[in-house]
């Protein structure tokens, strides 16, 4: 029976006062009853507009229908035709700006909770014992993949399903890229990422960790040894404010702060990698990374955590769900504040961050109202830890060690939008290393396109 409720089934979650002091997953996931109820809200439209918002083009109505009937393995099979990371996507994709944005139920109420259903289906499948993976017949061709983030994992998975021998070269000691070093445990448990990666290994994907491409091996050598190369090395180089005081003790880039916490488990008492446990933390930025850093600071024991953002609250680029969770946990939002100096000294470290009070002016080229300084008005936000979360760019190592590979002014690889083809014949690229920092699902979409293009390219050489 159809469920014509105007609102989604709510997502069960930890109490804000409890979760703010632990790193356990915040969202607890739907029950079977909730999944079937939510699936019944889907109208199974003849023209499924939801699909046009999905970068990997999931057959959303089909998997929701199967889930609603309790056929969760069939729902998983449908999802896995197009996605190599369903348990990840169900947790971290900004569905409200993609598939759910185009859902017809959203015209007069809330859209169907597509991501929550996907998460349940993936978790159900991953909980089954003795999952059998059918390995494709080898086609005799080899592809090298640089990096092991979402673009690379997707590209590798799609190629492995086509019979290619795929080898991933990962610079860190643990595969997963931004999924393991950037996104906190309370949003994306690392066991979930590891499970998805084990699925790729079962398809035959080989992963070599501690291989820094550009140092241990370079792109030219990979081109000689493999039929094609995909570069999905992400955007791991942090950007800074370039204001006085950024060299003080207690100032972190979001990359370092989150990597120490997520990958090195610096929040544990016996951690080998130390990190400052703040009393008062100021996080500069307004995106998902800033929300992650702020919520991590709270879990490290901070009594007060502030988001410092130069535009207004309505202009925050982070997901609404992440902003809502941060508010519930007591994070303060100091909007219309533009940092001009980090205060303190070299001996004691950070004491605060001085901010110019701003107001919103005329829209910029992207349609967002520009922050304009209010003359003579400043405010100091007290803090003993400051985290800079204003964006990242691609690491320059590949650019410095690869001849004839074209890059743009921001350091990203120039690649064709549809195929990921670069200026080197058998080299393809996608994800943040091309676009700059973006979402997991957009990176996955790029990896998927490149996998199809690599397959087409190699077949054309026969």
Image (cartoon, rainbow, N blue to C red):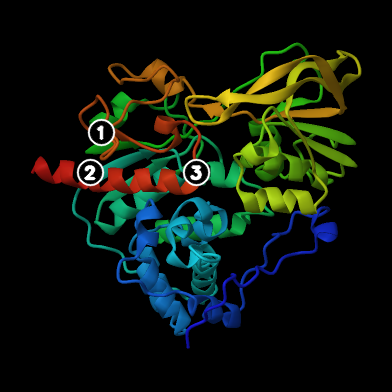
Nearer the observer: mark 1 or 3; the answer is 3
The earlier-in-sequence mark between 3 and 2 is 3
Q: Which residue is mark 2?
A: 453
User: Is 410 situated left or right of 390 in this image?
Assistant: left
Q: CA distance from mark 1 to mark 3?
A: 21 Å
Q: Which residue is mark 1?
A: 421
Q: CA distance from mark 1 to mark 2?
A: 8 Å
Nearer the observer: mark 3 or 2; the answer is 3
Residue 73 visible to the viewer: no
What is the quadrant of residue 225 in the picture?
top left
What residue lies at 60% left-to-right and 48% top-to-bottom? 319
Question: Which circle marks residue 439 in the picture?
Answer: 3
Q: Residues within 10 Å of mark 3 (few under 14, many from 20)?
A: some
* Nearest the eye: 257 or 207: 257
Relative to 199, residue 154 above or below: above
Q: Is label 1 in contact with label 2 (beta carbons under 8 Å)? A: yes
Disc 1, SS: loop
What is the quadrant of residue 356 in the picture?
top right
């Amino acid at each position: 029976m159809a469920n014509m409720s105007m609102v989604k089934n709510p997502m069960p979650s930890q109490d804000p006062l409890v979760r703010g002091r632990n790193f356990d997953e915040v969202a607890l996931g739907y029950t079977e009853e909730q999944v079937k109820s939510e699936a019944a809200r889907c109208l199974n439209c003849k023209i499924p507009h939801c699909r046009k918002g999905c970068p990997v083009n999931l057959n959303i109505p089909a998997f929701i229908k199967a889930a609603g009937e309790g056929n969760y393995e069939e729902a998983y099979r449908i999802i896995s035709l197009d996605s190599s990371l369903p348990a990840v996507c169900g947790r971290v994709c900004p569905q409200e700006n993609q598939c759910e944005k185009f859902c017809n139920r959203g015209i007069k109420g809330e859209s169907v909770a597509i991501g929550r259903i996907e998460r349940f289906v993936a978790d159900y499948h991953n909980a089954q014992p003795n999952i059998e993976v059918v390995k494709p017949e080898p086609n005799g061709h080899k592809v090298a993949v640089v990096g092991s983030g979402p673009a690379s994992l997707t590209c590798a998975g799609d190629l492995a399903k086509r019979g290619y021998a795929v080898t991933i070269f990962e610079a860190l000691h643990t595969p997963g890229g931004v999924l393991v070093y950037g996104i906190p445990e309370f949003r994306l448990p690392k066991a979930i990422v590891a499970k998805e990666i084990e699925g790729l290994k079962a398809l035959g994907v080989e992963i070599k960790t501690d291989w820094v491409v550009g140092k241990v091996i370079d792109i030219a050598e990979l081109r000689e040894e493999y039929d094609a190369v995909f570069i999905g090395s992400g955007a791991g180089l942090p950007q800074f404010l370039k204001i006085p005081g950024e060299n003080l003790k207690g100032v972190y880039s979001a990359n370092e702060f989150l990597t120490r916490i997520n990958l090195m488990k610096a929040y544990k008492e016996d951690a080998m990698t130390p990190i400052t446990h703040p009393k008062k933390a100021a996080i500069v930025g307004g995106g998902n990374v800033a929300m992650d850093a702020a919520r991590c600071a709270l879990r490290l024991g901070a009594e007060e955590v502030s988001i410092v953002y130069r535009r207004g609250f309505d202009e925050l680029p982070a997901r609404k769900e992440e902003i809502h969770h941060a508010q519930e946990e007591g994070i303060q939002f100091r909007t219309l504040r533009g940092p001009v100096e980090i205060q303190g000294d070299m001996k004691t470290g950070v004491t605060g961050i001085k901010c110019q009070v701003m107001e919103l002016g005329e829209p910029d080229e992207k349609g967002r109202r520009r922050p304009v300084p209010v003359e003579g008005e400043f405010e100091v936000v007290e803090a003993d830890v400051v985290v800079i979360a204003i964006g990242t760019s691609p690491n320059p190592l590949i650019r410095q060690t690869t001849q004839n590979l074209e890059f743009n002014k921001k350091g990203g690889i120039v690649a064709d939008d549809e195929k990921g083809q670069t200026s080197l014949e058998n080299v393809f690229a996608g994800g943040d290393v091309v676009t700059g920092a973006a979402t997991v699902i957009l990176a996955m979409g790029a990896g998927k396109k490149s996998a199809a293009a690599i397959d087409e390219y190699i077949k054309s050489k026969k």
